[in-house]
Amino acid sequence: MVGYLGFQLSARNTTIGLLNDDNAGLTLEKDQLILDLEKMRFSYDTLETENSMMVAELAAQQERIDGLLTKVKNGYWEVAKLKKEAETLRSIMKGYIGTIDSLNQLNMALLDENLAMKEQMEAVSQENADLVERQENMEDMLEAGQTLQVAEFLPTGVRVLSSGR
């Protein structure tokens, strides 16, 4: 009987050791998952955009991350499922980063185009002002030419020789 109890005690100690190893592994995975989720939340916090629709989507994803963190910290978690969901959130964030980057590049191109159009508009406005001023000067010269009077005008004939003098 003592031998049997010793064997049972040894088997339990082995089982306890295995469970402790599993527990340590799961705790390590839990800590790693918490760290990954907190990094992802920080990444979402640093994304900036002025697009109201994207701001709402970013806020929804941040709430989703916070919910996952709460589940992990409270122990209501399945490592594989949460890792998969974290990976999904990470891929969504990469999509947002790409969208924000392309919108920023498009915005810069539109700003450059807007500046070029303003410069062109100013040049056309200046040319128009110059033409208006030239027209006014010509109208003044026409008025002055219409009021010219000739005094002491004597018609005389001019004799032209065959040599052309």
Image (cartoon, rainbow, N blue to C red):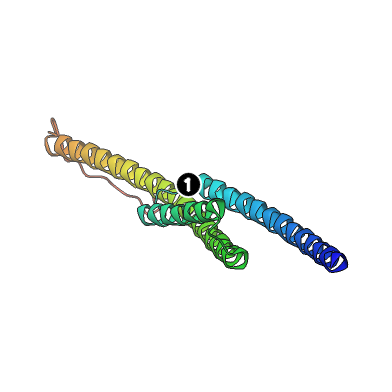
Q: Residue sitting at 58 percent across and 64 percent down?
A: 78
- Quadrant containing the N terminus is bottom right
Residue at coordinates 68% horizontally, 58% vertically from top-left? 26
Q: Nearer the viewer, residue 162 or 15?
A: 15
Task: Report x, y in % for residue 37.
Answer: 58, 53
Left/right placement of residue 145 relative to residue 125 reads left
Q: Residue at x 80, y 60 (%)?
A: 13
Compared to 106, does 50 lie above or below? above
Q: Quadrant of residue 129?
A: top left
Q: Horizontally, is 138 left or right of 115 in the view?
A: left
How far across and down, in percent of the image, does residue 148 sit?
Answer: 14, 34
Q: Which residue is mark 1?
A: 48
Q: Nearer the viewer, residue 148 or 142?
A: 142
Query: How far across and down, in percent of the image, does residue 104 sit?
Result: 49, 52
Q: Secondary structure at mark 1?
A: loop
Tell whether 37 sits left or right of 110.
Answer: right
Res 21 → quadrant: bottom right
Check disc 1: other Cα within 10 Å, few if <14, some if 14-19, many if 20+.
Answer: few
Task: Give residue 122's position: percent from left, percent from top.
Answer: 35, 43
